[in-house]
Image (cartoon, rainbow, N blue to C red):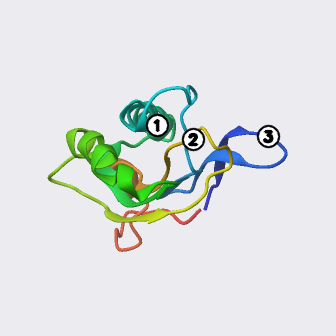
Amino acid sequence: MTIERHRSNQRMSQVVASDSMVFLAGQVAKDATTDIAGQTAQILAQIEELLALAGTDKSNLLSANIWLPDIREFQSMNAVWDAWIDGANPPVRACVEARLARPELKVEIQVTALRSQARIADHDPLNPKQVNE
């Protein structure tokens, strides 16, 4: 199995991908001066970019974890999420209230996804044509 790391420093990677799985670090808004809707939209755009870097997209999301420092902003965040998510392929999701690393941050989102179906098929253990690596 190959492990790829993208946008890494000595502390962490923004993306870690294996042959079939993609794990993203928790994403926060780069411009934290915006409201919850603006921050959520920024984060979802960042997630799309990172998923593409790893060879997948939001239709392959498996799970999402969302942290809000103020749960009263839940509906505003959901409005942006609902407009973005692939409704035919929604992931499992948890959303909790928690203090974030900086007080100006209004939301943090972390996702896990499968790689594209074509790539997964290349590594199918039930595929008799597969060559062991």
Q: Quadrant of the N terminus?
A: bottom right
In this view of the protein, can residue 122 be seen by the observer? no
- In the rendered structure, the answer to whether residue 3 lies left or right of residue 95 reads right
Badge 3 is on which residue?
Answer: 9
Q: Please tell me how crowded label 3 is: few (under 14), some (14-19), or many (20+) other residues with Cα within 10 Å.
A: few
Quadrant holding the C terminus: bottom right
Residue topped by disc 2: 105
Amino acid under label 1? Ile
- Determine contact: label 3, label 1, CB under 8 Å: no
The residue closer to the viewer here, 70 or 131, is: 70
- What secondary structure is marked by label 2? loop
Query: Relative to 5, does residue 112 appear above or below in the rendering?
Result: below
Residue 55 placement (x, y as % from top left): 44, 40
- Looking at the image, tell me whether mark 1 or mark 2 is earlier in sequence order: 1
Q: Nearer the viewer, mark 2 or mark 3?
A: 2
Percent position of residue 32, x then y = 56, 30
Q: Nearer the viewer, residue 16 or 32?
A: 32
Query: Residue beneath label 1, please?
Result: 43
Q: Is residue 24 left or right of residue 82?
A: right
Say few, some or many: other residues with alpha carbon within 10 Å of mark 1 (under 14 / 14 to 19 / 20 or more). Answer: many
